[in-house]
Amino acid sequence: MSPPRQKKPVERRHNRPLREVLDELLSHAREITRRAKAMTPAELDYAQQRLEWLADEVWRVATGETAPPE
């Protein structure tokens, strides 16, 4: 019987731009979760807008769409 082949470790970050925007989205969501009760209505509104923007960025990067017009 031959010895088992050693597998190369799988590179999970082959799409670095997507990984980066996902990390930012998760970080922001965790920050909101920690601070939501202490945030002012204006801070909550901004946090929601940023969360929606980050979700749009994740979609854009994942699907390969071009950047939205500025």
Image (cartoon, rainbow, N blue to C red):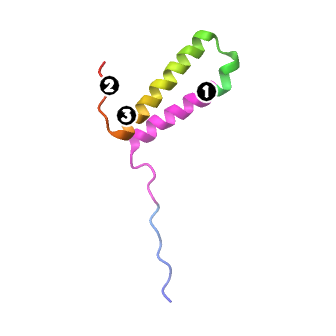
Evaluate if marks 1 and 3 touch, with contact meaning CB atoms under 8 Å apart: no
Identify which amino acid the numbered label 1 is placed on.
Glu
Tell me which residue sits at (70%, 18%) in the image.
37
Q: Which residues are magenta?
A: 10-32
Q: Which mark is residue 54?
A: none
- Please state which amino acid type lies under the numbered disc 2: Pro
The extreme right residue here reads: 37
**Residue 12 is covered by the magenta coloring:** yes
Locate residue 61, reporting x and y percent: 37, 37
Neighbour tally class for label 1: few under 14, some 14-19, many 20 plus, Cα within 10 Å:
few
Dot 1: what SS?
Answer: helix
Disc 3 packing (10 Å; few <14; some 14–19; many ≥20):
some
The answer to the question of whether label 3 and label 2 lie on touching residues, with beta carbons closer than 8 A, is yes
Q: Amino acid at mark 3?
A: Arg
Provide the residue designation for mark 1.
31
11 relative to 26 in the view: left or right: left
Quadrant in the picture for the C terminus = top left
Q: In which quarter of the view is residue 11 placed?
A: bottom left
Whole-percent x, y for residue 56 in the image? 42, 29
